[in-house]
């Protein structure tokens, strides 16, 4: 009996649980505790120049108060905590020699691609989705540091992008807020379907987002929302960088397009479309799509129809300038070794994106910023605004594309402006972008939802 008691006590100690007679310390699973995610605190921002919304007067020497991740108030002059009725130890952010404005938004990125992925061929056949989510986390932080506090990802595996989005929302990893489409809808052999692989590889890589016929497309649209899509991305036409020789014209039928957009809108989702050829662009606008991505071969008739319907153009100019707008430039650039079909389509594209923006500006077609970064390097997103100014926009119009226009196009009512009640997504530039649009590349400070991620031009980790 004595031996049994001794063995029982020894077992309790071995398991880290004290015997009843000495019950003081119980070791809990998971100790030590995991780090607590950063949370927003009240802050007083003193801005040398403050643009609460592009197009509104810029305030000189202004104070912005943030609280609980939201804008609390805006004041003329540098106001102190006592005057604001705040505790004396309230954080003060000195941006008195900076230009402060709303965080930028990019409505077309591929955040899980590029970087390491761009340097290793066949990676998608060898790595799990977790690999791409981790790669996306690195790219997301780079993008946030560039002043983009919201991005819309329009093409990644569901598992990778939805997991990354949720991890950022929970504060597990830092990054911009992500509006995620997941896998884009495509017809069989369309831009979003697999091409030019042996049958065994095709069968081993099923695409849940491929659909044919109106009812099948309606089902897949609903299914994609069920899986977690915040927005629907639809491949209405062929594309430049897929290896198909099927061209860049309309591939979904009018009936299929209508079924998809009806399904998306009925479930409260914006529906946007990859579209290059004029026929596909016009069909998508008639069907009621919210925005056109790329729109490369839209003509004046197409752009006037978009203006009449309030359909946003998201022209993705910067990646084409980055890749090269002449055959000679392409062959010296990062896409020189792509497949022959894509190379031929890229040669044909030339500087059409810049011409498209010039037409759209003249006609008055609404434009929101999107870069297709993942082709161009992540973190260079603001270069898109420079491209717009080169095409004829004013600097203020270009700033609108990445703030209020982007928020409107994406249906995001809580950001794009620094008004009371809006998200505390605040950035500061070293110089005045109204005077020189190139200043959008000089981001000194980044706050997202009241949390500081960049200060004095350096990343803030805690």
Image (cartoon, rainbow, N blue to C red):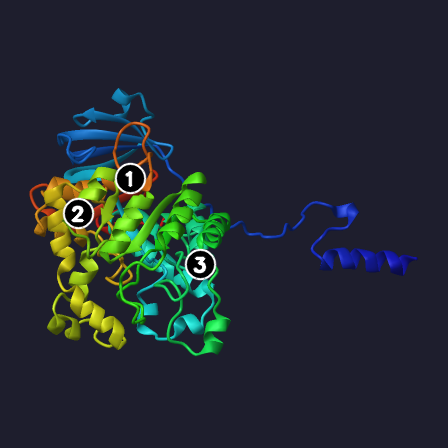
Residue at far right of view: 1
Residue 44 location (% of width, % of height): 27, 31
Instruction: Report helix, strand or loop for mark 1.
Output: helix
Q: Which mark is residue 301?
A: 2
Q: Earlier in the sequence, mark 2 or mark 3?
A: 3
Relative to residue 420, is residue 198 depicted above or below? Answer: below
Q: Quadrant of the N terminus?
A: bottom right
Give the residue displayed 21% in from the left and 32% down from the top. 52
Counting the numbered discs, the total is 3
Tags 2 and 3 touching, CB below 8 Å? no
Residue 2 visible to an observer of this rendering: yes
Tell me the CA gap for discs 2 and 1: 26 Å
Give the quadrant of residue 266.
top left
Which residue in the structure is indicated by mark 1? Answer: 407
Give the residue displayed 13% in from the left and 55% down from the top. 354
Q: Earlier in the sequence, mark 1 or mark 3?
A: 3
Query: Which of the two marks, 1 or 3, is nearer to us in this view?
Result: 3
Give the residue displayed 20% in from the left and 44% down from the top. 367
Which residue in the structure is indicated by mark 3? Answer: 212
126 and 221: which one is in front? 221
Query: Which of the two marks, 2 or 1, is nearer to us in this view?
Result: 2
Residue 149 visible to an observer of this rendering: no
Tell me the CA gap for discs 1 and 3: 32 Å
398 and 439: which one is in front? 398
């Amino acid at each position: 009996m004595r031996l049994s008691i001794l063995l029982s006590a020894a077992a309790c100690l071995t398991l880290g649980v004290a015997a009843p007679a000495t019950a003081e310390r119980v070791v809990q699973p998971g100790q030590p505790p995991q780090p607590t995610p950063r949370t927003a605190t009240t802050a007083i921002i003193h801005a040398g120049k403050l643009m609460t919304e592009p197009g509104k007067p810029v305030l000189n020497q202004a104070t912005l108060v943030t609280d609980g991740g939201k804008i609390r108030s805006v004041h003329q002059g540098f106001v102190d905590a006592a005057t604001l009725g705040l505790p004396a130890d309230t954080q003060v952010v000195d941006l008195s020699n900076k230009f402060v404005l709303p965080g930028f938004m990019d409505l077309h990125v591929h955040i899980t691609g590029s970087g390491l992925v761009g340097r290793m061929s066949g990676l998608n056949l060898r790595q799990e989705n977790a690999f791409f989510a981790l790669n996306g986390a690195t790219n997301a932080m780079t993008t946030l540091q560039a002043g983009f506090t919201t991005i819309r990802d329009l093409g990644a595996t569901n598992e990778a992008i939805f997991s990354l989005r949720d991890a950022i929302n929970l504060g597990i990893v830092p990054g911009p807020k992500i509006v995620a489409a997941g896998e884009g809808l495509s017809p069989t052999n369309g831009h979003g379907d697999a091409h030019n692989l042996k049958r065994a590889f095709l069968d081993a890589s099923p695409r849940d987002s491929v659909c044919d016929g109106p009812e099948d497309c309606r089902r897949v649209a609903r299914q994609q929302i069920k899986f977690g899509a915040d927005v629907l991305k639809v491949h209405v036409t062929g594309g430049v960088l897929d290896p198909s020789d099927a061209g860049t014209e309309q591939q979904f039928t009018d009936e299929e397009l209508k079924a998809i957009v009806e399904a998306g809108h009925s479930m409260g989702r914006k529906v946007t479309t990859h579209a290059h050829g004029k026929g596909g662009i016009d069909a998508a606008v008639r069907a009621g799509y919210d925005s056109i991505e790329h729109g490369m071969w839209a003509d004046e008739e197409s752009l006037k129809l978009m203006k009449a319907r309030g359909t946003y153009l998201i022209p993705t100019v910067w990646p084409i300038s980055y890749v090269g707008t002449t055959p000679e430039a392409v062959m010296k650039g990062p896409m020189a070794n792509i497949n022959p079909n894509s190379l031929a389509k890229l040669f044909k594209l030339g500087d059409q994106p810049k011409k498209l923006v010039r037409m759209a500006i003249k006609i008055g077609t609404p434009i929101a910023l999107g870069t297709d970064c993942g082709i161009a390097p992540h973190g260079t997103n603001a270069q898109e605004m420079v491209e717009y100014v080169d095409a004829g926009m004013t600097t203020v119009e270009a700033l609108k594309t990445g703030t209020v226009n982007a928020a409107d196009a994406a249906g995001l009512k809580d950001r794009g402006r620094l008004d009371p009640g809006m998200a505390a997504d605040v950035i500061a530039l070293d110089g005045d972008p109204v005077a020189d649009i190139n200043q959008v590349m000089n981001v000194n400070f980044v706050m997202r939802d009241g949390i500081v991620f960049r200060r004095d031009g350096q990343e803030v980790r805690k």
